[in-house]
Amino acid sequence: MVDVRLLDKGETGAQALHPLEALDLARRLPGLIVSAKEVAATVMHGVHGRRRAGAGETFWQFRPFVYGESTSRIDWRRSARDDRIYVREREWEAAHTVWIWCDRSASMGYVSNLALQPKIDRGLVLGLALADLLVRGGERVGVPGLTRPFAARDIVERLSERMIEEASRHGYVVAELPPADALAPRTQAVVIGDFLSDPDDISRMVLGMASRGARGHLVMVADPVEETFPFTGHTEFRDVDSSARLRVGEAQSFREDYMMRLALHRDRIRAIAASRGWSFTVHRTDRPASEALLALRMQLEAGLGG
Amino acid sequence: MFGLPLAFTAPLILSALVVLPALYYLLRLTPPRPREVSFPPLRLILDLQAREETPARTPWWLMLLRLTLAALIIFAMAGPIWNPLPTSEGGRGPLLVLLDDGWPSAPTWTQRVAAASERMAAANRDGRPAALVPMSDGAREIAALDTTRANERLRTLKPAPFSPDRMQVLPAVQVFLAKNPQSEIVWIADGLARGQADAFAQGLAKAAGDARVQIVKEDRLPLAVTATENAAGGLEASIVRADTRSASGGLVRAYDKKGLAMGEARFDFGAALETKAQFDLPIELRNEIARVEISGEHSAGAVSLLDERWKRRRVGLAAGSTSDVAQPLLSPLFYLRRALQPFAEVREAPAGRGDPILSLLEDRVSVMVLADIGVVSGKAHDELLRFVNDGGVLLRFAGTRLAGSTDDLVPVRLRRGGRVLGGALSWDQPKQLASFPPESPFAGLVPPEEVTITRQVLAEPDANLPNRTWAQLADGTPLVTAERRGKGLLILVHVTADTTWSNLPLSGLFVDILRRVVALSGQTQQADGDTGAVVRNETLAPSRTLNGFGVLGAPPLTAKPIPANFNGPPSAEFSPGFYGPAEAQVAINTLSPGERLEPAVYDAKFVMENLMRAEPVDLRAALVACAFFALLVDALASLWLAGGFDRMRTRKLRGRAASLLFAAVLGGSLFAGDRAYAQAPSQNPALTTRLAYVVTGDAPADEASRLGLASLSRALANRTALSPGDPAPVDPARDELAFYPLIYWPIVATRPQPAPEAVTRIAAFMKQGGTIIFDTRDALTARPGGPPSPEAQWLRVLLAGVDVPELEPVPRNHVVTKTFYLLDNFVGRTTVGQTWIEALPPDSADQANRPARAGDSVSPIIITSNDLAGAWAADSNGAALYPLTPGGARQRELALRGGVNLVMYTLTGNYKADQVHVRDLLERLGH
């Protein structure tokens, strides 16, 4: 029989936390950080296997000097070899900005015995690992509504600290979706969550964020139970965010309907994303986190490259 | 019910079982609580509400469980009883319980009382009175009582040690039944015919008419001991059983007067109804046996009591004539031997062992039989007189020698010559025996017609003669006379022990007379010596009697003295048991020899029931427990169906459960720890060598002893190979002293002297090789040659009860001054006191200039006055505790050295003295 449970408040670290509960999250985060770094390392290693030009200070090309340019840009060593004067061009060095947002609402704190991890843990691991990966790749990472974009070697720890701090702030209300503020053009947004909100809210958020041309990726984290609906018999379903309840005599008779509704919901989100050129992926918590991270990374690279 | 031994006290409640189908319907309709599931994507399907709301049915197994639960409760309410009590089925009148309470019912008495009680309780439920009639009640009128009083009566009943005559009860029963024709009759019978059971059964069947008569009896009828016989081979007990369904074998145990087990013997009936068990014991032990009983058969019938009559006496035979082996029938000893052998140990003096009488007396015979010995003189006479005075029985037979001349060991003066009857020179016919006078020990024996006396010795007429006559001829001539002499008896039979003077030795009477005479040897202490005749008490008071269970105890208030020649079966007045004074008790047994046990025959219309029945079990409690268990299972199942276990898995609950578990484990371990602590092993004083001091009761002195010996023990551990344990305080009156080689005893004159037992133990300790140092601690107060100090006096009083060897001041060359250190004297807190030790044997010439001398053993006593312990005493840092006189570290060191030497002396003895010979020995070996 499938077995589900809701994480305690202290376990999610996404509620209005008391300092004590914030500490609980802090206690919990190092494990997440470690796993995030591990996940990031495996992904980095896997992609670096294909030779590619690195970002940063590396040489790009020599090109003939054009009059009007600053002479200080001439590469004299190269120019001394023949009669022409060359300018050393380096790779474009301006870092990209990636906004990463993890849903930490109550519905994320959900785990069934089919899953490897609660949804929130998986979401945080994904987000932090991605941040680590990106910062090591030279990008800047920010959390909308929480930090401005920055790059630091200890990006994972710092983001975690900020999350803990935010959670322990008085009057903190956990949000299901990131603020719909417009992001700067040529930035990318990664929104990780279960996207069980109203599609209109999601649409508003995506439109708002992409209003200045930012690109984005929606990662829907789903528990296997939410995908397969393995319930049978007389069951009373309770909502997590609200007090809604649904008592059904034969739960198995709802499966078809539920699957249909779920597919519909996803289709709508996918359509919203596609309308702004955003990507939408579904990640199940019974799959390894590195799989989702790899996929995310490929998509981000495509975005960064463009 | 349904062929099962099952009954219900409230069977109407069972009709509630018809509700079960309704319950089934109701349960089907009421579903269990739904399973609660949190489901985040719920809002996707919230609007699907109205689709299918038919609840799931209750699972069949849960329904079965609940129906069972309901059925269990209904059954429990109906009061089920397994093996129910017999319901009263006979009549509406009172219940008449006839209870056999003779000894055969004793082994199963508890069950009998329980059976009677059950029957009466059943009657009580129907509101009927009950009448309880024990068979020993006699012809008392029977009244129906209410059950409470009948029960009280029942509880006071005990089995009687005899078989009551049931016919005496029958008239009362007939009267009762005539008055209450509707009675129900239950006879709790012992199954034996003893006590006219058959006749009573017929009478009862007649009296009961068509009333229902139920007989409750036990299949296994009891066993009984009918007789015991101290035969030549051993003590034989005859055991009987009523029929072959009784136990087929078992164990008989013999006990002496004090109840100590003397031996046991097996018996096996095989297919017979009678068997014998034999105790193979030496005659001395056999004579001690006072009681024989069948093991495990707790009834008076299974006990046989033995008195003096059962003792086998040792009888010495001596004859005046030389025994002619070729013609044994001419020898009087032949007849005596043959008559005595069945019940006595016959001894004859072996030829060529000096005086036969003396050698027989050395064999410690109880009865001495002298056949035709006229005069016993010299040492044999003195010894014989002493033997009689000490309680022996001297039985003499007349003969030609005796007729010629007699000594003083005869009860009456004899006329010379005797008389001859029926001879050629006589007018008289051979005489027959007259019946025995009632005060004679032979009273009760019947003289046979054919016994005739042809010749006898005659007694001189005398005032005392009638008193001394035990048997006489038809014309009144004494045939057997007896006189009490000292504690013993002199008996003279006026005829020979062979057939020359009479044919008495050929008759059975001869054996009986001898048997009684031999039995008399056990009772010779009683009766006064003057009259000569043994005084036979008219009656014998009960001393200890058997109760129905076969236990000897104080006689009941109703017990009456028995006449001296009581011979009948025991009854309500005459319980079996021991009667008479302690030194000559007469045993009355429940069964007489040769008796048999017959099973009773009951009327065919009686309803038989077995006494041994399974106990009724009230199933209510078990059913309620089952129902409760089912309820628990149901609750768990409901919880499981509703998904309640999942909620229990949350961390907090788990944490709480874990903490509870932890607390329980912690608590358990705490308790376990307590137990472990309580079992700390006690120290065994024998495992380590320890010095000991006597606790005087004076706290400062005891403290000084303790500290001093502790300090000395440390010094010993530091300096020598001996590592003594902590010094032990001992109290010579209580503690075992054998563990300690050396005991230090400071004398405190103000304390009371130890108890005499303590003094004996001190003496024993010193005898067994222990050494005691008495420290009077009075060197400063006592003046040499002056009056003894209080301490010295105290010590003198103490040692008055002890075997103290000769003492001397420790000589310079005594080995105690050489055992470890070389010392001149033993100093303590003072130096002037003298130390005394067991005096050594005087020097032999070659020992005179030996550096060390020693006795053969360690001196058991050393007396000093220098307060040694005070000088030794130091605290744990080694700092001295008591000032010394004159003082100085050297004195303290010398005191310790003295202590070390004393301990070494007690442990090694004269070893050091032997060491001084080493040089001589080596020299000798070298040459």
Image (tube, coloured by chain):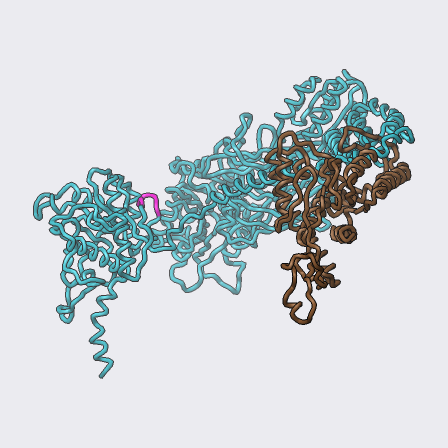
Instruction: Describe residue A283's horizontal placement relative to residue B711 as left or right.
Output: right
Q: Which chain is brown?
A: A
Give the quadrant of the N terminus of chain B. Answer: top right
Residue A299 rendering spot, x and y as whole percentages? 79, 51
Residue B514 rendering spot, x and y as whole percentages? 51, 47
Give the quadrant of the C terminus of chain B. Answer: bottom left
| Residue B734 magenta-highlighted | yes
Determine the main secondary structure of the stretch shown in magenta: loop
Span of residues in magenta: B730-735
> In this orientation, which residue lies closer to the viewer: B602 or B878?
B878
- Please name the residue shown 65% across and 29% down the image: A171
- Please name the residue shown 65% across and 70% down the image: A80
Would you identify the image quadrant in which residue A175 lies? top right
Instruction: Give the residue at the far top of this rendering.
Output: B179
Instruction: Give the residue at the far bottom of this rendering.
Output: B927
Instruction: Describe residue B159's horizontal placement relative to residue B468 as left or right.
Output: right
Q: Is residue B225 in view?
A: no
Tag count in the figure? 0
> In this orientation, which residue lies closer to the viewer: B364 or B517?
B364
- Please name the residue shown 61% across and 30% down the image: B571
Colour of the chain lettered B: cyan
| Residue B449 magenta-highlighted | no
> In this orientation, which residue lies closer to the viewer: B426 or B648?
B648
**B640 w.r.t. B805: above or below:** above
Residue B866 rendering spot, x and y as whole percentages? 16, 49
